Image (tube, grey):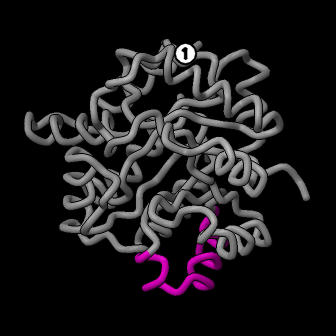
Amino acid sequence: MTASLIDQAFKECKAEGRPALLTYTVAGDPTKKKSLDILKAISKNVDIIESGMAFSTPIADGGDIQTSAHRAIQAGINLNETFKIIKKFKKTKYPRPVILMGYWNLILQFNENNFIKMCKKSGVSGLIIVDLPHPENKAFAKKCKKNEIVFVQLLSPTTSKSRMKQIIKDSDSMIYYISQSNTTGGKLKVPPKDILKNYYKIQKLAKNKNCVIGFGITDKNISKFKSANGVVVGSLNSKIITNSIEKNHNPVIKLDRMIKKLKNKII
């Protein structure tokens, strides 16, 4: 099997001696058109795009991302429209690998086989399903692998060592380490050195896999995580979109500036 676009992105970043920059925005926020414009603008400085599937009850997400999801739903987003945005994005100048992130219920309602089919058709490279833990996700992860879609397993500070070993063993080429046990967007309550201490333990067990750190990463602390394979910035982006709307500014320009700033901090 050929290396996935996600693997290639990590490889290129390693060659440049820096972590991959992954950014999360909710598909369809603030509108379907603006959402695509945001992806086009930020893709110049982003290595991997995480696109959120808007859901009415996003249990793992804090206020900023919940606001984004609500706004996207109000603007008429659904899974079919999400796939359309991704398909259009994949035809642009910087068609970065796209990881879809969301909740299992959405996929069940859509039908999991149809969902995988649409992922392939629109150019999705990976999936993160926050409420489908290991080992319950093994059958679906197997389907993803068969269709050359990277199913990203999640690890957290509370994952026991034996469970961690099993998850790593069953994982595809990318793992997501949740830096702290709370919803997205919470302030980083754990010192970066303690997060990295746990992260290095994972890296040691997952030598041939790419492990990213997410939850609580902002422009204020991103430079502390330069030694990671990748860093994920999400809630900050939702906050910028909300602030831009409130102040009648263009969220595309504001986000583009922030992503440039983030990239410069990890070079």
Q: Main secondary structure of the magenta part?
A: helix
Task: Name the residue at 64% across, 79% down.
Answer: 117
- SS under mark 1: helix
63 and 97: which is toward the camera: 63
Task: Name the residue at 37% across, 31% down.
Answer: 216
Relative vertical location of residue 139 with respect to residue 15 in this rendering, above or below: below
Q: Position of residue 70 (x, y in %)?
A: 20, 61
Task: Name the residue at 46% across, 59% down.
Answer: 130
Left/right of residue 141 with respect to residue 56 in the rendered view: right
Q: Position of residue 228 (x, y in %)?
A: 62, 24
Relative vertical location of residue 139 with respect to residue 61 in this rendering, above or below: below
Relative vertical location of residue 243 with respect to residue 70 in this rendering, above or below: above
The answer to whether residue 119 is magenta is yes
Query: In the rendered image, is residue 251 in sight?
Result: yes
Q: Position of residue 80 (x, y in %)?
A: 44, 76
178 and 82: which is toward the camera: 178
Amino acid carrying label 1: it is Ile
Magenta residues, start to end: 105-123
Tell me the quarter of the picture where residue 171 sits. bottom right
Quarter of the image that includes the N terminus: bottom right
**Residue at image mark 1:** 266
Quarter of the image that includes the C terminus: top right
Query: In the rendered image, is residue 5 in sight?
Result: no
63 and 96: which is toward the camera: 63
Left/right of residue 70 with respect to residue 26 in the rendered view: left
Relative vertical location of residue 53 with respect to residue 115 in this rendering, above or below: above
Task: Name the residue at 31% across, 67% down.
Answer: 55
